[in-house]
Image: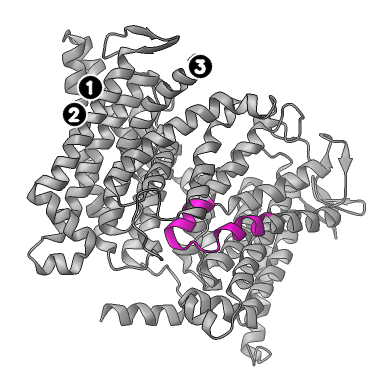
């Protein structure tokens, strides 16, 4: 029973990170109908920027919470600029090109970002600074840390803010209109270019925060960390119904929990034949299962055929 | 195609043949490493042509293609290495590898028939990763794939007593191992290109094209879309399986690391960059993308030394950086690929109007 609770907590924490990253995918897909393959790389850059800034500032004598705060802020700013630039360079010129073309440019950008990061930060794993005091709590046999609480709380706040943005502001309305029908939206006076750029910028900011969380949680950062994270977050977005904001959140948390349970119980289920290093498989099995039986995702509207 | 026997084409064919025969010796003068790069480029041509059947002909976006390559490579590695103590000859293994890859192709294709576009891409991507994770971890409790260490000292290709590894004297010439493989690969490439050309204009090829353009219409005119799509997956996969087997033999070593998603992505990039569905374009794309990063590897160090007087930036990441930028730029200016088929070019021009 205590294992169950423990896995649930771990899954929730991991899942809220997935959810934040998934939002970046789902917003772009909802509006433009394309997978932003470079999003995972944006998240990685966010982590590394936050790492460098906070370590440098802490070394200069600033208290760690302030250094960390500035670190997160600068990560968000850098990622927003990156997201905006990405859209300008790799996607906007190709909006009317054949469908596979933006996929290739996204892959190209992904390679560029990864190698830029490798040039700047090197190939080695880096230790992410401890930004928050780590206090351990115990509850009914399971234990969790203050960092885990902060991660879940922050992502809840970010998601609420995003929902407010989407459903309570003019920009949000413009985004929803563009997602429904870009052509008609533009006839109604919506500046499509701005809306798309905004989707990239907002998604990247969320990604930066998620990146900092990953760093704080695992206390490690690496230039290749973005890829698999991005893949899983994309899975989460599909699981929830791609293009659906609430779906991405639910999908992310669900995927985190499925993974935690999968990794925790696979050994028992298969009599020790498969161990917890098969953890990564669950995301893909979930993905294939969802797409086979409910391609629109758990919360997506039924669209018969997409793309 | 009709009058390929007229003097001018005959001359052209003769010149190309001579060039193809002489190439490994010309390139080999700059070091055997270049012949090896050339061999890998030809291997990538196999892979790109195989993927082109799925993506280019049938229009099914497959991002897990490397899985079939991996299956072929591991089949060869397991059946011709000290790992299980088996040393089967290549002509026995390649068909098995192709067949098994084919089975995997159908296994992947069957549940994904209803999906299309991006969704299909993601499922195939997940499938590729699952295969890789299994290869990484199937060393316990029963050691099948030897996990992350991979399988080494795999037998080279042997025909009778003639081995393709190491130097040997032939017709008074010293031929190195990579050069021997080169000729084998070129022969295979000619066969594979021929099969692809015939396939494209066959009944099946036209059915694929119909599905690519409009699946519902294709169904309405009586094409069994399910079987035809499965056939595309199966045929594409079997080419991947064959390429994998040869890779294994040439390299003498396989490990899951060679079959990462990045490789699938690279092969897809070759197909799209060259010109989807257009065989000469795909071959061009594969050769370019296989050779360009390697050429950059040799170029970035001297260029930096000439400009800055020393090596400032890690050459490995610099070459990948240039490569990534090249992908972006080419797609920006030539969205249909470097050498698209004439029909596709026309379609794009119509869209723009």
Do residues under tags 3 and 2 come within 8 Å of each other at their CB atoms? Answer: no
Q: Identify residue for label 2.
A: A74
Q: Pointer 1 and pointer 2: residues touching (CB < 8 Å)?
A: yes
Between the C-alphas of marks 1 and 2, the distance is 8 Å
Q: Which residues are drawn in magenta? A: B104-124
- At which x and y percent is residue B308? 32, 36
Q: Nearer the viewer, residue B187 or A45?
A: A45
Labels 1, 2: one chain: yes
Can the viewer see residue B312? no
Q: Position of residue B282 (x, y in %)?
A: 53, 67
Tell me the number on the disc at residue A1: 3
> Camera-side residue: A244 or B304?
A244
Number of other residues with Cα within 10 Å of mark 1, as a class: few under 14, some 14 to 19, many 20 or more: many
Judged from the image, the secondary structure of the residue bearing numbered disc 3 is loop
Q: Is residue B56 left or right of residue B184?
A: left
Chain letter of the residue beneath label 3 in the structure image: A
Tag 2, which chain?
A
């Amino acid at each position: 029973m205590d294992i169950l609770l423990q896995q649930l907590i771990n899954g929730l924490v991991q899942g809220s990170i997935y959810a934040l990253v998934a939002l970046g995918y789902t917003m772009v897909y909802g509006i433009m109908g394309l997978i932003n393959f470079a999003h995972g790389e944006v998240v990685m850059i966010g982590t590394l920027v936050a790492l460098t800034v906070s370590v440098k500032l802490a070394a200069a004598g600033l208290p760690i919470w302030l250094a960390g705060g500035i670190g997160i802020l600068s990560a968000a700013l850098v990622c927003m600029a990156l997201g905006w630039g990405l859209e300008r360079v790799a996607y906007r010129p190709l909006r009317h090109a054949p469908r596979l073309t933006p996929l290739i440019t996204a892959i190209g950008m992904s390679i560029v970002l990864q190698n830029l990061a490798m040039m700047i930060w090197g190939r080695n794993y880096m230790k992410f600074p401890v930004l928050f005091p780590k206090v351990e709590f115990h509850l009914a046999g399971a234990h969790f840390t203050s960092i885990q609480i902060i991660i879940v709380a922050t992502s809840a706040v970010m998601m609420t803010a995003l929902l407010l943005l989407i459903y309570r502001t003019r920009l949000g309305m413009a985004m929803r209109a563009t997602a429904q029908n870009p052509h008609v939206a533009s006839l109604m006076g919506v500046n499509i270019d701005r809306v798309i750029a905004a989707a990239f910028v907002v998604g990247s900011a969320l990604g930066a925060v998620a990146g900092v969380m990953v760093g704080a949680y695992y206390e490690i950062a690496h230039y290749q960390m973005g890829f698999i994270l991005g893949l899983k977050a994309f899975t989460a977005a599909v699981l929830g119904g791609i293009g659906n904001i609430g779906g991405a959140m639910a999908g992310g948390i669900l995927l985190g929990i499925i993974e935690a349970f999968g990794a925790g119980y696979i050994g028992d289920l298969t009599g020790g034949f498969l161990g917890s290093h098969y953890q990564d498989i669950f995301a893909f099995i979930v993905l294939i299962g969802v797409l086979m039986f409910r391609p629109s995702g758990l919360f997506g509207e039924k669209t018969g055929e997409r793309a | 195609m009709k009058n390929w026997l007229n003097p001018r084409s005959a001359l052209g064919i003769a010149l190309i043949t001579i060039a193809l025969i002489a190439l490994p010796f010309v390139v080999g003068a700059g070091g055997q490493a270049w012949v090896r790069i050339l061999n890998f480029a030809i291997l990538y041509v196999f892979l790109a042509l195989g993927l082109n059947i799925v993506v280019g002909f049938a229009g099914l976006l497959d991002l897990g293609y490397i899985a079939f390559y991996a299956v072929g490579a591991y089949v060869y590695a397991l059946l011709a290495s000290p790992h299980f103590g088996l040393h089967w000859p290549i002509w026995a293994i390649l068909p098995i590898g192709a067949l098994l890859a084919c089975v995997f192709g159908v296994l992947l294709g069957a549940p994904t028939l209803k999906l299309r576009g991006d969704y299909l891409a993601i499922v195939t991507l997940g499938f590729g990763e699952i295969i890789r994770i299994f290869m990484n971890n199937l060393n316990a409790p029963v050691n099948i794939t030897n996990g992350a260490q991979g399988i080494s000292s795999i037998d080279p290709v042997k025909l009778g007593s003639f081995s393709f590894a190491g130097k040997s004297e032939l017709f008074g010439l010293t031929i190195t191992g990579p050069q021997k493989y080169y000729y084998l690969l070129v022969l295979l490439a000619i066969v594979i290109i021929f099969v692809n050309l015939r396939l494209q204009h066959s009944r099946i090829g036209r059915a694929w094209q119909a599905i690519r353009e409009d699946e519902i219409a294709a169904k309405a005119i009586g094409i069994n879309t399910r079987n035809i799509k499965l056939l595309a997956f199966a045929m594409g996969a079997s080419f991947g399986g064959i390429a994998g087997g040869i890779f294994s033999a040439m390299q003498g070593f396989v490990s899951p690391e060679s079959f990462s998603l990045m490789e699938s992505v690279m092969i897809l990039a070759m197909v799209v960059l060259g010109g989807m569905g257009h065989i000469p374009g795909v071959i061009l794309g594969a050769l370019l993308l296989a050779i360009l990063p390697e050429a950059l590897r040799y170029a970035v160090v001297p260029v930096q030394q000439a400009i800055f007087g020393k090596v400032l930036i890690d050459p490995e990441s610099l070459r990948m950086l240039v490569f990534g930028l090249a992908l972006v730029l080419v797609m920006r200016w030539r969205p249909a690929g470097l050498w698209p088929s004439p029909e596709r070019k026309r379609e794009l021009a119509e869209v723009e109007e």
